[in-house]
Image (tube, rainbow, N blue to C red):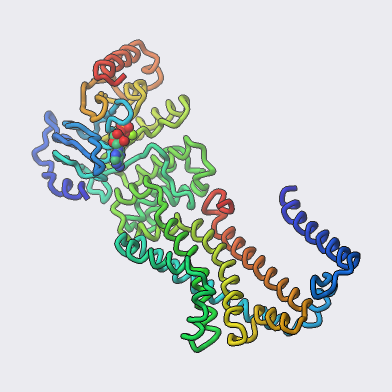
Amino acid sequence: MQHNKAVHQASPSSSQTRNNPVPALQVHRVSHTYPSGTVALGTVDLDVEAGEFVSIIGPSGCGKSTLLRLIAGLEAPTTGAISRELARPSKSPIAFVFQQPTLMPWTSILANVRLPLDLEGVAARTSEPLARQALARVGIEDFAQALPRELSGGMQMRASIARALVTEPSLLLMDEPFGALDEITRARLDRELLAVWAEQKLTAVFVTHSLHEAVFLSNRVLVMTPRPGQIADTLAVNEPYPRDESFRLSTRFADLCAQLSHMLIAAGSA
Amino acid sequence: MDRLVRWVAPIVVFVVALLVWEWLVIRLDVPVWIVPAPSRIGATLVRDWPLLVSALGVTLRIALQALAAATILGVGIAFVFVQSRALEASLLPYVILLQVTPVVAIAPLIIIWVDDPEAALVICATIVALFPMISNTTTGLKSVDAGLLDLFRLHRASRWQVLLRLRVPSALPYFFSGLKVSAGLALIGAVVAEFVAGTGGTASGLAYQILQAGLQLNFPRMFAALLLIAVAGVSFFAATSGLAWLFLRRWHAGAGDR
Ligand SMILES: Nc1ncnc2c1ncn2[C@@H]1O[C@H](COP(=O)(O)OP(=O)(O)O)[C@@H](O)[C@H]1O
Ligand SMILES: [Mg+2]
C-alpha cells in the first residue's frame, strides 16, 4: 500500500528544528484520475504541520474525498507524490473517519472499536482496555455491549471516532464526519473533537461542507475549486485553542465566515 | 396479536378447509378414486403408518444428504468465485447450465452411471438444490460495505482477515436465504428423482409409495404419502427459518425479512 513506502522513506526527524518543523504531511503536485477517466482531482500541493488542524472545503464532487483517500493511501496518485512524517511508531499511523459511521452491524460497539487492534494482531487482553478507554474518551463507555443499530446517529459517529483513536494514530483524516447530524449534535461533537485533538496531539485533515464548522475547528481552511479540484485559497484562523461557544458567537467568527464565503465565491464554488 | 394471527390463522384455514372438503365429499358423494375424504386419508395414515414412516425416513435422508452436499459444495464454489474473477467467469456458465437443465432429463443418466441407487438420488437432488447456495453465497460474499472494506485495507488486513471478519459475516443473511430455498429444492429433488427412478430406484421412498399406490388404485394411501411430503417440506422450511433466526437475530437488523 502507498503509505507503507512513504513511512519508510521518511527521514528520521533529526533535522527537525523548532522554528522550521518538517511537515507531517506533504502532498506534492498530486492529481488523480479514476480508471473510468474521471479527473477527480487537479494538481494539489499541500503541507500540513504536525499537530495542525486543517479543513478542506469545496463543492461536492470537487475531489475532497479523493484527496483524503490519496493521503490515506487507499488510492495511488496518478501524478505527484505524498510523503508522511509520522511521529508515532504505530502500525496504523493513519486513521480515517468516514462520512457514514461504517460500523459492522453484526457485532458490538466494543468489538467494532477494537477492530483495528484485532487486525494488527493485538491480543484481546490488551486491546479491550484500550477500546474501552477510547469509548470513554468519546463519552459512550456505557454502550460498549450495544449493537450499532441500537445507537443514535450521533453516538454511532462517536463510536466511529473511538475506533479511529484506538490505535493512537498521528494523522486523523475525516471525511464530512458530522454531515448527516443535526446542528446541535454537530456543534457538540465539534467541541469534543477539538478536545481529543489537543489531548492526543493529533494532526488532523478534516473535510466539511460547512463554513462554520471549518472556521470553528481549524488552524487553516483550504478552499477548493469545482472539479477537477485545486486549492484556490487558504484562510488562516489565528484564534487560540481551546475554543468554545463564545468563539462561535464572536464577531470575529462571523467575519472569518464571511471571508471564507467570499473565497468560495471567488473560487467559483458557491 | 400479530404473532397469534400468524400462527393461528393458517391453522384455522387448514381446519376449515378439511371440514369443507369432508362435507363436500359426503354431500356430493365423490367416489374415493377421485378424491378420498380427509377422514379416509387419516385412517390410512394410521393403518399404513409403519410403511409410510419408513418411506418418509428414506426421502428425508436423501433430501438431507443432498442439502448438506449442496451447502458444502455451494459455499465452497462461492468462496472460489470471490477469490478469482477469472475462475468465476470460466465456471459460471456451467453452473448455470446445470441449473437450467431439468433434473428429470439428467436423472436417468445418473441412475445408469451410479451403481448405488440412493447415491444416484442424492446426486440428482444435490443438482437441484445447488444453485441457490452458490448464487446467494457469492452475492453475499461480494456485498461488503465499501467503507468497511476501505477500513480493513487502511489497517492492512490480510486477504484472510477480510474474508473471515468481513465477507463471511456480511454474507450470512444471503447464505441463510439461499439455505431456505435449497432446503425446499432438496426435498423436491429427492422426490422427483425417485419418481424418475421408479421401480429401478431404492424402492422405498415416498415417491415410490405414491407410484405403487397409484398402480394399486390405493388412492387414500397416495394422498397420505402426499400429505407427508407436504409436511416434510413445511418442516424443512421451518427448520431452516429457525436456524436463520438463531444465527441472525443478533447479527443483522431485520434478518428474517430477507
Ligand atoms: N471510485 C470512483 N470511480 C470513478 N469516479 C469517481 C470515484 N470516486 C469518485 N469519483 C468521481 O470523482 C469526482 C470527485 O469525487 P469525490 O472525491 O468523492 O468528491 P467530493 O468528496 O469532493 O464530493 C466526482 O466526479 C466523482 O463522481
Ligand atoms: Mg466526498
Q: Closer to the camera, B140 or A7?
A: B140
Farthest bottom residue in view: B115
Residue found at x 72% / y 51%: B3
Residue B56 position in % (x across, y down)? 67, 78
Residue A198 visible to the viewer: no
The answer to which of B245 and A174 lies nearer the viewer is B245
Identify which residue, A263 or B5, lies in the foreground.
B5
| Residue A253 coordinates in the image, percent (x, y) | 34, 15
Q: Quadrant of residue B65?
A: bottom right
- Identify the residue at image location x=52%, y=54%: B251
Question: Which quadrant of the view contains residue B250?
Answer: bottom right
- Which residue is the extreme one toward the left? A15
Is residue B20 placed above or below A2 in the rendered structure? below
**Rendering coords of residue A62 (x, y %):** 28, 30
Residue A1 seen by the camera:
yes
Where in the image, quadrant-wise, is ligand 2 located?
top left
**With B194 as the anchor, is B3 left or right in this view?**
right
Question: Quick check: A10 above or below B50?
Answer: above
Residue B147's x, y, as percent? 37, 45
In the shown orientation, is residue B20 left or right of residue A157? Answer: right
Using residue B131 as the reference point, say whether residue B49 is left or right of it.
Answer: right
Residue at horizontal 49%, vertical 71%?
Answer: B70
Residue drawn 47% across and 66% down? B99
Q: Is residue B251 above or below residue A62?
A: below
Numbered-mark total: 0
